[in-house]
Image: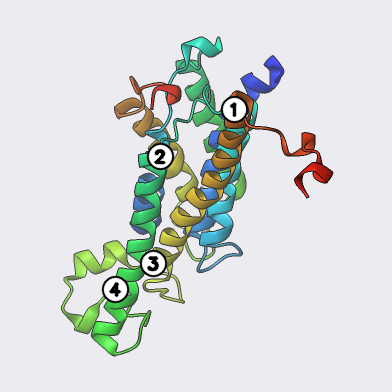
């Protein structure tokens, strides 16, 4: 059975979520970051997390679990609060 | 900025932010910590601001958000310090996560970092410092960029154009 240390996961998810909520689309910039961008980001995040490895003594899974939690948090934050925000100029 | 940069920077900034978060989380056991991780996250935000500009940045950093995160970071740090003062008589005393053995095991395991150091409140202090540094450094750059925008739109006399002999 895999024993996952939950402390770093929660804090990483929380910080990632806060950062993810700030993502918004800016149509006038001409660039659109669509779903494939975030899919590639998740894949790259997993590869990087595997390459970084876990913290010393946190060898529950062979990944930097905080890194993955932050990446998932960013995506969750983007999906929940990251859409439909006002452009910065109007704020 | 060039289109290549505009395509590349936002995904790269997300990865840098994750690396910053990891640096904050491992602050008690690996090189790094709240300041270093916060500076890395701020670097990612600044990267976006410089490439996309203040108005078109895909990371929307409003005044309320910056003020809120800064306040949460400061309050968390102060409250953890006061908890030490209340329970031990020393400000910022490292209480651990099991105060007087009254915390249930399930909650203790949730908040404990199970490495040999048993860092107690240190990871949470790192978290608070990370929030503050992230917002503080980003706010400086946003201010400078805002001043530049203001300078473009202002009708005030440029300092370099002043005739100093006339002023004296």
Mark 2 or mark 4: whose residue is earlier in sequence = 2
Chain identity of mark 3:
B
Residue bearing mark 2: B63
Residue bearing mark 4: B97
Please tell me whether mark 3 or mark 2 is closer to you in this view: 2
In the rendering, at what x and y percent does residue A30 appear? 55, 9
Mark 3 or mark 1: whose residue is earlier in sequence = 3
Q: Nearer the viewer, residue A79 or A27?
A: A27
Residue bearing mark 1: B154
**Disc 3 on helix, strand or loop?**
loop
Query: Is A83 displayed left or right of A48 in the figure?
Result: left
Chain identity of mark 2:
B
**Disc 1 on helix, strand or loop?**
loop
For the residues tagged 3 and 1, is the chain the same? yes
For the residues tagged 3 and 4, is the chain the same? yes
Estimate the spatial distance between the alpha carbons at disc 3 and disc 4, rounded to whole Å: 9 Å
Estimate the spatial distance between the alpha carbons at disc 1 and disc 2, rounded to whole Å: 22 Å
């Amino acid at each position: 059975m895999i024993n996952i240390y939950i402390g770093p996961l929660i804090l990483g998810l929380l910080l990632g979520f806060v950062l993810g909520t700030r993502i918004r689309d800016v149509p006038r910039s001409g660039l659109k970051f669509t779903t494939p961008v975030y899919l590639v980001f998740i894949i790259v995040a997993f590869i990087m997390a595997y390459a970084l490895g876990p913290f010393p003594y946190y060898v529950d899974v062979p990944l930097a679990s905080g890194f993955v939690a932050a990446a998932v948090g960013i995506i969750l934050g983007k999906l929940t609060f990251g859409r439909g925000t006002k452009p910065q100029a109007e704020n | 900025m060039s289109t290549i940069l505009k395509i590349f920077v936002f995904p790269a900034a997300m990865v840098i932010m994750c690396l910053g978060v990891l640096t904050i989380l491992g602050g008690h056991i690996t090189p790094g910590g709240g300041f270093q991780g916060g500076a890395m996250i701020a670097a990612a935000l600044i990267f976006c601001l410089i490439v996309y500009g203040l108005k078109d940045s895909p990371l929307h950093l409003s005044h309320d958000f910056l003020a809120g995160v800064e306040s949460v970071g400061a309050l968390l740090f102060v409250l953890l310090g006061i908890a030490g003062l209340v329970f031990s008589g020393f400000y910022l005393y490292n209480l651990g996560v099991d105060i007087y053995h009254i915390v249930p095991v399930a909650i203790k395991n949730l908040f404990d970092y199970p490495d040999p150091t048993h860092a107690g409140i240190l990871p949470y202090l790192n978290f608070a410092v990370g929030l503050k540094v992230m917002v503080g450094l980003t706010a400086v750059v946003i201010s400078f960029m805002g001043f530049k925008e203001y300078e473009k739109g202002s009708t005030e006399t440029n300092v370099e154009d002043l005739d100093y002999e006339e002023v004296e």
